[in-house]
């Protein structure tokens, strides 16, 4: 029987571990070690955020995408995807509805859709901010130019989520077709941070060809980038993609990595993601028990929710449905946490730019 509690203690103390120890913790920890890891992750989160859980209203604004990422259900090459794009008015209606429910952060997510021009987005962002001045706007719209990110920031966007997907160039190549590159992705992340966005990166767990060494590289990138948010979820296959036949990632490994990240960066915003909920289905209780402090229920109109299918069986009802917020609140209370109304900013907003050598 292994006992790696001392590694968990070292991680809590130093906020990092060498590669060999990180590998042991990720690959070989036994059940006892993992429950200790999660306990320490919860302690770290509680110390910074108390028992508050932040909520974001997710609005999936378009599933058109110019990219062809092999894992993603809304990739350009999937001609079975039914495409849609919300109008500015529909987006504002979602925000209005979410505001009434108590949401104070809205995440506008979508494929890389050419119709989402700077003009369209700056109009939406500035109207939302003018009307709901106490709200934060998060964007998750993929790779754009520096100038575009700047304009959207100047229009009032506060945060940007752009998962790096994998920090290993070789692995990046296996997940994306030519024309997309790891370096471009990192450049975007550096631009976002440099502009002043609260920035999020992240990766899928057990995406095809991912190795433990790849995950360690991801962890090293996260250490150096010092993002304000980290999005982690299991890879889940989508039936109409190149990776249809691959296995889904496990909840066990996803939760372990979540806990490691929480202990490394106690003040990071760490969502318990829809992909995790899709495979676990317990209203995010397990994610919170692993140190997560953010949940992103879906505020998209029903027709959009069904069409924004990144992977098979994406959870859209119950705890994922923003309209069911009262049910989610009860579930979260049952484990001693509270959903709070507020922007829910990172408690370390002043993180400065980063390291040249990513
Ligand atoms: N176009 C935006 C938003 C992409 S969708 C962007 O490029 O950032 C948001 C995230 O969903 C992606 O970053 C990816 O990590 C995740 N995702 C996509 N397909 C997935 C799949 N099959 N399984 C699990 N997560 C997936």
Image (tube, rainbow, N blue to C red):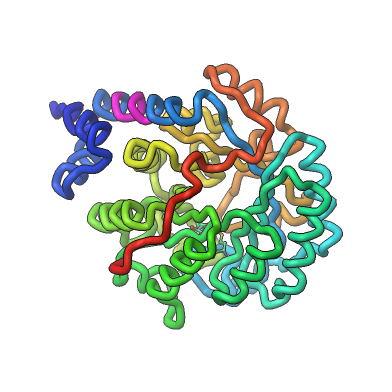
Image location (x, y in percent) of residue 276: 49, 42
Asked if residue 347 is positioned above or below residue 119 in the image, the reply reads above
Region in magenta: 36-41
At horizontal 46% and vertical 65% (from top left) the residue drawn is 189
Q: Is residue 163 magenta?
A: no
346 horizontally vs 173: left or right: right
Asked if residue 140 is positioned above or below residue 327 in the image, the reply reads below
Asked if residue 120 is positioned above or below residue 278 in the image, the reply reads below
Picture quarter containing residue 214?
Answer: bottom left
Foreground pick, 358 / 315? 358
Q: Is residue 39 magenta?
A: yes
131 horizontally vs 81: left or right: right
Picture quarter containing residue 344?
Answer: top right
Foreground pick, 38 / 149? 149
At horizontal 50% and vertical 30% (from top left) the residue drawn is 49
358 horizontally vs 10: left or right: right
169 horizontally vs 21: left or right: right
Res 15 visible: yes
At horizontal 71% and vertical 66% (from top left) the residue drawn is 82
The total number of labels drawn is 0
Res 77 visible: no
């Amino acid at each position: 029987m292994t006992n790696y509690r001392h590694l968990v203690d070292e991680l809590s103390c130093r906020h990092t571990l060498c590669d060999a120890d990180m590998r042991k913790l990720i690959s070989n920890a036994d059940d006892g070690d993992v429950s200790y890891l999660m306990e320490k992750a919860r302690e770290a989160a509680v110390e910074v955020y108390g028992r508050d859980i932040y909520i974001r209203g997710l609005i999936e604004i378009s599933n058109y995408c110019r990219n062809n990422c092999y894992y993603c259900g809304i990739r350009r090459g999937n001609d079975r995807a039914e495409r849609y794009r919300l109008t500015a008015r529909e987006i504002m209606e979602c925000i209005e509805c979410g505001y009434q429910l108590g949401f104070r952060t809205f995440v506008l997510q979508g494929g890389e859709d050419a119709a989402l021009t700077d003009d369209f987005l700056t109009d939406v962002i500035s109207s939302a901010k003018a009307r709901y001045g106490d709200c934060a706007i998060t964007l998750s719209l993929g790779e754009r130019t520096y100038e575009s990110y700047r304009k959207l920031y100047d229009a009032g966007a506060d945060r940007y989520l752009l998962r790096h997907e994998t920090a290993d160039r070789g692995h990046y190549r296996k997940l994306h077709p030519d024309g997309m590159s790891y370096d471009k992705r990192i450049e975007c992340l550096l631009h976002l941070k440099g502009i002043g966005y609260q920035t999020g990166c992240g990766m899928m767990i057990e995406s095809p060809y991912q190795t433990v060494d790849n995950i360690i590289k991801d962890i090293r990138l996260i250490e150096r980038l010092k993002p304000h948010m980290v999005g982690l979820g299991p890879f889940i296959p989508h039936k109409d993609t190149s990776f249809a036949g691959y296995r889904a990632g496990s909840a066990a490994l996803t939760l372990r990595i979540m806990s490691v990240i929480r202990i490394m960066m106690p003040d990071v915003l760490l969502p318990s993601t829809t992909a995790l909920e899709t495979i676990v289905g317990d209203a995010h209780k397990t994610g919170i028990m692993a140190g997560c402090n953010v949940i992103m229920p879906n505020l998209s109109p029903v027709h959009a929710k069904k069409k924004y299918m990144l992977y098979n069986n994406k959870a859209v009802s119950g705890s994922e449905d923003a309209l069911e917020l009262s049910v989610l609140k009860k579930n979260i209370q049952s484990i001693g946490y509270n959903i709070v109304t507020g922007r829910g900013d990172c408690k370390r907003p002043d993180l400065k730019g980063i390291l040249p050598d990513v």
